[in-house]
């Protein structure tokens, strides 16, 4: 196994906002607390430690023990849960939807990012303890986003009529999904491990939360990962004062819009609403709006006066669910968290939120871009070598790559840029000699230059076309290889499920990732498996 890497900024797959954030552009500095460098964790520890109560720690540990009561815990996970009672314990957190069978491959990269960062911090701050946490997005309600995954070239889907928080969905119908998946997996020891993981997760648990917890625990419990479900009455009690403030003051919109003004040169990831709360029950997650002093749950008959909705909040805080603007606030309210690890899209909306945290006197976490990985099989690595390609070549857009390789494969390389410069120099020489001539001659000379440059450009296009046809077989091999590694011109990690790599790898995929990921390195890893 060998590895390589390229800078995120050079990969071509990250937005201007993320590139500027990674480059620590001064214009963005008001939007975050501390940049995620190892030396900055000392001050983050001091701030969060002074701003997180023992009461919240005790409630958190009690809630986690209840959530894990039907799950077999590893010794390291149980130790990490118990340690959260101590004022010297802090978390490193990532979050993810409850995608079917973990969804795209980057789910694993998120988790190993928080695991490896926690381990690094445990080595550098020996008087503290750091716990990796996976926040399950159990209250999301977009079922279409999570009901499928891609295994090799096959989309495995779960057809189901669903509404409300996805974590509460029953697992009926997943037995039929397994039959379809089983046909694609094949045979062998690793194939059987994948089949067993699916069966134990989905066919032996009643809802999607429990199933997802089982699968994540089976994959990562040996590393001490703690999995948390925010759809919890006791945890929502801790969040209730913030819900009340939002209901009465609609404070989030004003604070977030202030930050958005600083992002005017970038794409704004999310926009706040007047009220950034949902009302949830089984099968229901709908926005709460306020009209003429009355709180209404959209698409229902539920309406509340201010007095009534505050009574509901006091009696049943669990029915209030934060949207994307307030969910991070909820997370940081109940966790002694130092750093949030997420993808570029996630960090883009976190960068809108610092003013909201400041208004609530909640410590804003460091924002760390998760690891990104390109997995390359031994067969693919051999093809790359035979085609004289580098990994950085394969990150190029396909038209650029094919143009580059067409020139490389040509028997006699023609430097059309050199020819263009020579032609321009000739015309400059002519122009210098005819400066005293009448204007009509100069105009004719300019027109002739334009004509000949255009002709040279047309010749270049015809040459590339001819060379492309002559080397069509080799260029098609390059195209097919790039398509394998970047399906549909997208990142592999956003398309392919981990299972195909798990089965195809000659080694232990999880251990390979564990050994090679380091989010503080801020580089796109290419890992041969």
Image (cartoon, rainbow, N blue to C red):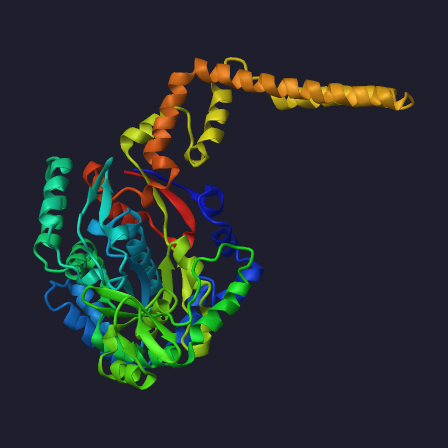
In front of the other: 181 or 216: 181
Kindly identify the residue that appears in the image at 46 percent across and 26 percent down. 402
Q: Quadrant of residue 231?
A: bottom left
Kindly identify the residue that appears in the image at 79 percent across and 23 percent down. 428
On the image, the x and y values in percent for residue 174 come to 12, 50
On the image, the x and y values in percent for residue 486 come to 36, 36
* Left or right: residue 456 compared with residue 323: right
Quadrant of the frame with the N terminus: top left
In front of the other: 460 or 254: 254
Kindly identify the residue that appears in the image at 30 percent across and 83 percent down. 310
For the question of whether residue 81 can be seen, the reply is yes
Q: How many marks?
A: 0
* Left or right: residue 132 compared with residue 343: left
Q: Quadrant of residue 63?
A: bottom left
On the image, the x and y values in percent for residue 101 come to 20, 50
On the image, the x and y values in percent for residue 412 come to 54, 13
In front of the other: 61 or 181: 181
Is 364 situated above or below 504?
below
For the question of whether residue 89 can be seen, the reply is no
Is 475 situated above or below 260?
above
Quadrant of the frame with the C terminus: top left
Is 336 situated above or below 307?
above
């Amino acid at each position: 196994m060998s590895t390589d890497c390229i800078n995120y900024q050079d990969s071509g797959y990250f937005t201007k906002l993320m590139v500027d954030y990674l480059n620590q552009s001064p214009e963005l500095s008001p939007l975050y607390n501390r940049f995620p460098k190892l030396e900055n964790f000392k001050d983050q520890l001091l701030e969060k430690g002074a701003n997180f109560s023992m009461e919240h720690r005790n409630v958190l540990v009690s809630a986690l023990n209840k959530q894990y009561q039907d799950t077999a815990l590893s010794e390291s996970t149980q130790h990490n849960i118990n340690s959260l009672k101590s004022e010297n314990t802090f978390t490193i957190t990532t979050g993810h939807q409850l995608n079917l069978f973990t969804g795209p491959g980057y789910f694993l990269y998120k988790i190993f990012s928080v695991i490896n960062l926690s381990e690094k911090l445990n080595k550098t701050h020996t008087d503290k303890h750091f716990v990796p946490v996976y926040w399950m997005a159990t209250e999301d309600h977009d079922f279409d986003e999570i009901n499928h995954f891609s295994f090799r070239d096959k989309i495995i889907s779960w057809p189901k009529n669903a509404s409300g928080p996805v974590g509460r969905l029953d697992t009926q119908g997943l037995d039929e999904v397994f039959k379809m998946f089983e046909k694609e997996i094949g045979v062998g020891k690793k194939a059987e491990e994948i089949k067993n993981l699916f069966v134990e997760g989905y066919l032996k648990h009643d809802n999607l939360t429990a199933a997802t917890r089982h699968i994540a625990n089976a994959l990562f419990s040996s590393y001490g990962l703690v999995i948390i479900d925010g759809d919890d009455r006791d945890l929502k009690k801790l969040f209730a004062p913030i819900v009340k403030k939002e209901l009465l003051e609609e404070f989030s919109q004003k604070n977030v819009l202030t930050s958005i003004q600083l992002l005017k040169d970038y794409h704004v990831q999310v926009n706040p609403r007047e009220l950034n709360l949902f009302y949830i029950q089984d099968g229901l997650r709908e926005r709460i709006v306020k009209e003429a002093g009355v709180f209404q749950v959209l698409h229902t008959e539920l309406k509340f006066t201010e007095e009534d909705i505050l009574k509901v909040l006091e009696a049943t805080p669990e029915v209030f669910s934060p949207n994307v603007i307030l969910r991070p606030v909820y997370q940081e309210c109940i966790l002694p968290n130092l750093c949030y690890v997420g993808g570029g899209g996630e960090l883009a909306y976190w960068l809108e939120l610092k003013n909201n945290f400041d208004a609530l006197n909640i410590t804003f976490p460091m924002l760390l871009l998760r690891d990104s990985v390109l997995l390359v099989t031994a067969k693919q690595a051999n093809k790359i070598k035979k085609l004289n390609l580098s990994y950085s070549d394969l990150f190029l857009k396909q038209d650029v790559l094919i143009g580059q390789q067409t020139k490389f494969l040509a028997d006699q390389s023609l430097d059309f840029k050199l020819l263009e410069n020579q032609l321009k120099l000739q015309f400059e020489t002519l122009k210098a000699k005819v400066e005293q001539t009448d204007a009509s001659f100069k105009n004719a000379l300019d027109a002739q230059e334009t004509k000949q440059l255009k002709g040279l450009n047309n010749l270049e296009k015809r040459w590339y076309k001819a060379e492309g046809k002559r080397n069509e077989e080799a260029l098609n091999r390059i195209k097919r290889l790039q398509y394998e590694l970047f399906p549909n011109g997208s990142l592999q990690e956003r398309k392919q499920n981990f299972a195909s790599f798990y089965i195809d790898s000659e080694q232990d995929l999880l251990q390979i990732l564990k050994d090679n990921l380091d989010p503080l390195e801020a580089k796109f890893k290419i890992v041969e498996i």
